[in-house]
Image (cartoon, rainbow, N blue to C red):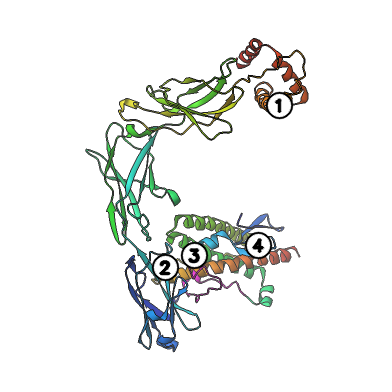
Amino acid sequence: KNTVFYQLFIPHCSIHLSLYFLFTNDAEGRLHQSQVAVFLLTYLGPPFNEKDFSPPRPNSTALSLPSAATRLELWHGLENQARLAQNQKAYSVLLAAVRELARSTLCPALKTSLLHFCTGLDGLLGSISALMTTLGYALPPPSANMEMRPTMNDFAKKVEGFWILRELQSWLWRSAKDFNRLKKRLRG
Amino acid sequence: MYVCFHHPDEAVISPQDPVLYIGSSLTATCTLSPELGLHASTLYWTLNGISVSSSAYSVLSPDTLSITLQNLNGSQQQSGDNLVCHGADGHVLAGSCLYVGRPPEKPVNLTCWSHNTKDLSCKWSPGGLGETHIQTKYTLKYKLRWYGREKECEVYNTGKQRYSCYIPRNLALFTPYEIWVEAANQLGSATSDITTLDILDVVTTDPPANVQVSRVGDLEDQLTVRWASPPELKDILFQAKYQIRYRLEDSTEWKVVDDVGNQTSCRLAGLQPGTVYFVQVRCNPVGIYGSRKPGIWSDWSHPAAASTPSSERLQSGSCDPKPGEQNSTLRRELKQFFGWVRKHASGCSGMSIKLYDQWRVWLQKSHKTRNQILQDDNS
């Protein structure tokens, strides 16, 4: 299987948090991009699927999510509520973005793969929201659906798709650490 | 309040997302934003990640570099070829997706079949060179011949079987349909010839049911095959034809028995003794509801197997096999033994050396008694 299924049981509440990684571990534990990622990048075509390719990050609504990258001391000191809120916001934006990616793709097999992946993301988002509610944290109001998307040419859409994938990978990698941290803090 | 910040693009390529014919040429331009402070002569182009030779470039002005691509090949991927304008350090300034292909040709080889008269599946081939390289939509359309509105098939397959479609219901019998395929893309369109067919002429059924193969008494060279007509249509398959094929267990060559007619049993003769045969049967609903056309053969049934009686018999009085014979007959005997176990001992849990000895004893009995036991077990 190409998705590593990571389960975390938080003792204060009977909620299982599952994370679907976009990576797999090989025999030596190194991370490789999973099938969905390779599939999408192959679909976009070279140079998108080339190692080290990095187009400038667009500033579109699809990518208006908190950055996964933070300084260590800031990340370490995050309060539970803030930590969860950042995750919740990130995956809300990413879920909508991947759904739109799936909708606009011309390859039916890729569309199916991406939609299947969305099901996992939806489950993850649901778990995070449920956990926030159980811990007594207010959920942020759902952001209004910004219909005013500036028209982008197809290449710009590809660059956006490339960055959505990148943000997704960063966030999934970070969330694993976030939830481990959360688990320790809730126990103690 | 949500304020939308729109960063000016660092550069703009023109044309954006063009659709072009294979073999044509394209001249594109990359125009820089003045705030970049770059000169057009420092830029370079790549197509699908590969640098394009600067002999194709032309500096039109300090902020505009053009490129002329000639004799374009069909697009490398469905999402379009990536034409990118780079700064000297490799930085991506802008991109445009090229869609290079050809208009579709008339789809050909349209064939349809109906499963049990309930539905209609059709497949076709793209005409000409086949690959158009750009997104091409195929629509299967159908209408009743002398009246009726045009309808579109909705359930298309994907992947390798994308040139096929499935109509699940609401099909009329006894009146011909006109069926055709329309192909269209951004460079043109084409329509296949119209195929006229009557659903009853293209029916295929499920394979025959309950195929069983058994020995004919003690005859070493014969086996009997019995089957039931496919359950779904058994009430109307009066004239159905059947076909049998069989082969030796280790062989890949099938022998076909063609003139089976509409019986539901057949005797195979001229077989090798003491050998395992695999047998399959299939059905053709010819003449269904008065159709005068040959129908379509069903899939072959699951293979059924049986073995012909062995010509070597352990008729000696003692319970021990003759020393020389043991190795050569052992495997064949074991095969027959397991078949017997499945029939007479419920499941494999009853297997033991005692059972094997019992079987060896049973083999000694006369064939009359053996048939008696077989009949008793079948009741």
On what subunit does the disc labeled 1 rest? B
Residue at (58% x, 66% y) in the render:
A169
Instruction: Give the amino acid type for the residue marked by disc 4 in the picture.
Output: Leu
| Residue B26 or residue B197, whichever sits in front | B26
Labels 4, 2: front one: 2
Q: Which residue is mark 3?
A: A97
Same chain shared by disc 2 and disc 3: no
Q: Earlier in the sequence, mark 2 or mark 1?
A: 2
Residue B357, x across and y down, in percent? 76, 20
**Residue B8 visible:** no
The residues tagged by marks 3 and 1 sit, at their Cα atoms, a distance apart of: 67 Å
Same chain shared by disc 3 and disc 1: no
Q: Which residue is mark 2?
A: B81
Label 1 neighbourhood size at 10 Å, few (<14), some (14-19), many (20+)?
Answer: few
Residue at (57% x, 23% y) in the render:
B272
Residue B200, x across and y down, in percent? 33, 31
- The N terminus of chain B lies in which quarter of the figure? bottom left
The residues tagged by marks 4 and 2 sit, at their Cα atoms, a distance apart of: 50 Å
Q: Secondary structure at mark 1?
A: helix
Do the residues under discs 2 and 1 have CB atoms within 8 angstroms? no
